[in-house]
Image: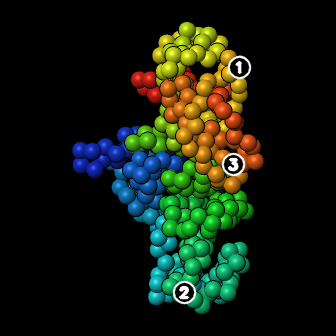
Amino acid sequence: MANIEIRDLRKKFGSLEVIPGFSLDVKDREFISLLGPSGCGKSTILRITAGLEELTSGHVLIGGRDVTSLEPRDRDIAMVFQNYALYPQKTVFENLAYGLRIRKTPDARVKQRVREVAAVLQIEQLLERKPSQLSGGQQQRVAMGRAIMREPQAFLFDEPLSNLDAKLRNHMRVEIRELQQRLGVTTLYVTHDQVEAMTMSDRIVVLNGGKVEQIGKPIEIYERPASLFVANFIGSPAMNMLDVQSDGQLVRVASGETLPAPGAPVGSFVMGIRPERLRFGTKALETALPFSISLVEELGSQKVIHGTAGGNSISVTFPEDAALPGGTAYVEFPKQHMHFFRSDTGLRM
């Protein structure tokens, strides 16, 4: 297998620069997700890595070999697309065998390899069917099988689960991750779904407007977001944000109330705290603010309570079997779970 190196990649469409300079090292056998909203440049980066899109400047290396000027077929990678890209007129067997056939692989080896891959993906019983006779999940397995057939140095996935329903999407992300770990193939995976990125990746690259906001392990990005963008994009419900002023000991919220926060930055900034880090408290607690409840969402495993505290809209999550507070509610803001961000740049302080 091999690592993937992307060096100062830049891409312009006319005078519009959509990728202003992107670099990334994907280690051998590593699973990295490019995560961000639509239009952030993640699919463009993947297509350039695959050779399907020309770059304006920069270099792409796979296994230490500069492949920047090579055609896709010469890069020794396999790509799985959002729409699966199966040949509709061919059977599953023929779809799997196609790549080996055009390389004039002996027929006996083709049949052996198809059987091996079909067994890995548990699609042996589908080999004589055509794509129109398959479910979305089955088509996805065939698309993955075609990628595996090539025994590539790297897998590139472009939002492969977007067309599946929620239950199947959850199942397939487990299958993809288990398969990648079993095969040990270096993988670059594009998604706009934070759950996919958080549960599947060794590391995540969070992109915004073609620029890297943060690179790190999923738990690092969740617990220490580098910017307001990352804090808002990662987590559901999103991190609560409150405009505050601080003297280094107390933070004053928009409603004029204060919370103890020794060691906080001095000045005006944005304070963030995750909904699950908030706790219901009492008026007697100096770390608590009055909380006006406006909506309760019952999600089965937990409740999400929306309301207003400190002059800001906030959300609180707690276990489904917990009782809502009676009368006036108070929410406690633990200092150890507060995050501080600059109001002007949005960067972590």
Q: Residues within 10 Å of mark 1 (few under 14, many from 20)?
A: few
Q: Residues within 10 Å of mark 3 (few under 14, many from 20)?
A: some
Looking at the rendered image, the disc whose residue lies closer to the viewer, 1 or 2, is: 1
Residue 259 place in picture, x, y as percent:
61, 17
Looking at the rendered image, the disc whose residue lies closer to the viewer, 1 or 3, is: 1
Does residue 269 sit above or below 326 in this rendering? above
Residue 140 place in picture, x, y as percent:
57, 72
Does the image show residue 150? no
Say whether residue 170 is left or right of residue 84.
right
Q: Are marks 3 and 2 in contact (CB under 8 Å)?
A: no
Q: Which mark is residue 205?
A: none
Residue 166 place in picture, x, y as percent:
59, 64
How far apart marks 1 and 3 lie (CA) works out to: 25 Å
The residue under label 1 is 285
The residue under label 3 is 302
How far apart marks 1 and 2 lie (CA) works out to: 63 Å
Say whether residue 196 is left or right of residue 84.
right
Q: Which residue appears at 46% of the width and 88% of the height? A: 89
Q: Are marks 1 and 3 in contact (CB under 8 Å)?
A: no
Q: Which residue appears at 53% of the width and 77% of the height? A: 99
State the SS at label 2: helix
Quadrant assignment for the C terminus: top right
State the SS at label 3: strand
Camera-side residue of 234 and 120: 234
Q: Quarter-wise, where is residue 154 in the image? A: bottom right
Q: Which mark is residue 133?
A: 2
Q: Which residue appears at 56% of the width and 82% of the height? A: 134
Q: Quarter-wise, where is residue 29 in the image? A: bottom right
Camera-side residue of 113 and 38: 38
